Image (cartoon, helix red, strand yellow):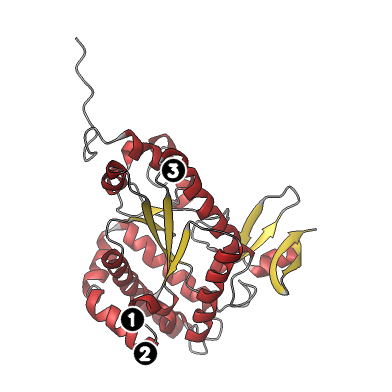
Amino acid sequence: MTSPARPRPGVPDGHPAGCAAVLAELLPYRRTLDSGHEDGDMDMDTPDAFPAQLRQLAAPVAAGAPLVFTLPGFPCKSPHPAKVLGHLPDEGERLALRFLDALCARIEAVHPPGARVVICSDGHVFSDLIHVPDRDIDAYADALRVLIHDEGLTRLDVFDLRQVYGQRLSHDAKRALVHDRYAPALEDLRSLTRSDEPTRRLYQGITRFLAEDSASFTGTRSAWQRDCRRRAYGVMQRSRAWGELIGAHHPGAIRLSIHPQPRGSAKFGIRLLDAPDVWMTPWHSCVLEHRDGRRELLHRADAERLGRLVFRQGRPSHFVAG
């Protein structure tokens, strides 16, 4: 008589088929390093390989409740004019939001109670570190809400510091409250960067973004590099703090991430649009529409060499290949 198959280590034994069905809708869009091959054969991307997500899904699926996904991101546009078309959302955000809404619709087909994505817009959390004015971040988040409404994307919400602390406190005061209550100690984070490969790669990716966006730095190269490394640790501290705050305000939600995540992580990295760089996002780039209809994220300086600029409602939107 054949012995029953042994469960994979760490996978909940007998997890509901509904959890696996939901996760199967997410897996084709998993964001990973090196085009998804950093942690082994892509054939391993089956629901059982993601026990953390199966555990997160178990309670709402068993209860027949709507699923809530939280996605930190959509902070603001990069301040570098060679990367983006301006400080407001454009075709990149429009396509990314439509993708997220459509993903929820596909999940609803296998989980009838439905699903929602709460976009946790984190620009105010980092604005002093990424050198973007808070007024531009307000304008960006407000325009996101208008875009969601105008596109009829009923499965999306936007959550930011204004929902947490209201309008009376200054942005600096709000940032201090988040940091003081939730941020990990700097030395603990430095130690983790040295010992944990995913954390080290995240630190390197954030440092690179900050370096690319520091177009106006006037100091020496060594001072510029030190400044980027210092701010990268600050971004990581605040990112951890923002994640803790989101968890407190959205208990039971399934955590998505716009950063690449290895198997086994509590966060599921999700790819919003095609891009040549796995770290690229709509807010660090713009869209180039190819002749065959494929859309790709590129830095503005690269996209404008390949296409002509298209306007939508009087604002620069994207490029179309010539």
Task: State the residue position of label 2.
Answer: 168
Quadrant in which the N terminus is drawn: top left
Q: Residue furthest top?
A: 1
Mark 3 / mark 2, whichever is N-terminal: 3
The residue located at (34%, 57%) in the rendering is: 198
146 to 47, vertically: above or below: below
Which is nearer the N-term, disc 3 or disc 1? Answer: 3
Q: Amino acid at mark 2?
A: Arg
**Residue 192 appears in which quarter of the rendering?**
bottom left
Please name the amino acid that badge 1 sits on.
Answer: Tyr
- Secondary-structure class at tag 1: helix
- For residue 165, the mark is 1
Q: Kindly identify the residue that appears in the image at 26 percent across and 46 percent down.
A: 59
Q: CA distance from mark 3 to mark 2?
A: 42 Å
Using the image as rendered, state which of residue 297 and residue 36 is in the foreground.
297
Report which residue position mark 3 lands on: 27
4 to 42, vertically: above or below? above
Instruction: State whether residue 30 is above or below residue 234.
Output: above
Can you give x and y, in whole percent of width and height, for residue 41 in the image?
Answer: 41, 37
What mark, if any, has residue 153 been given in the picture? Answer: none
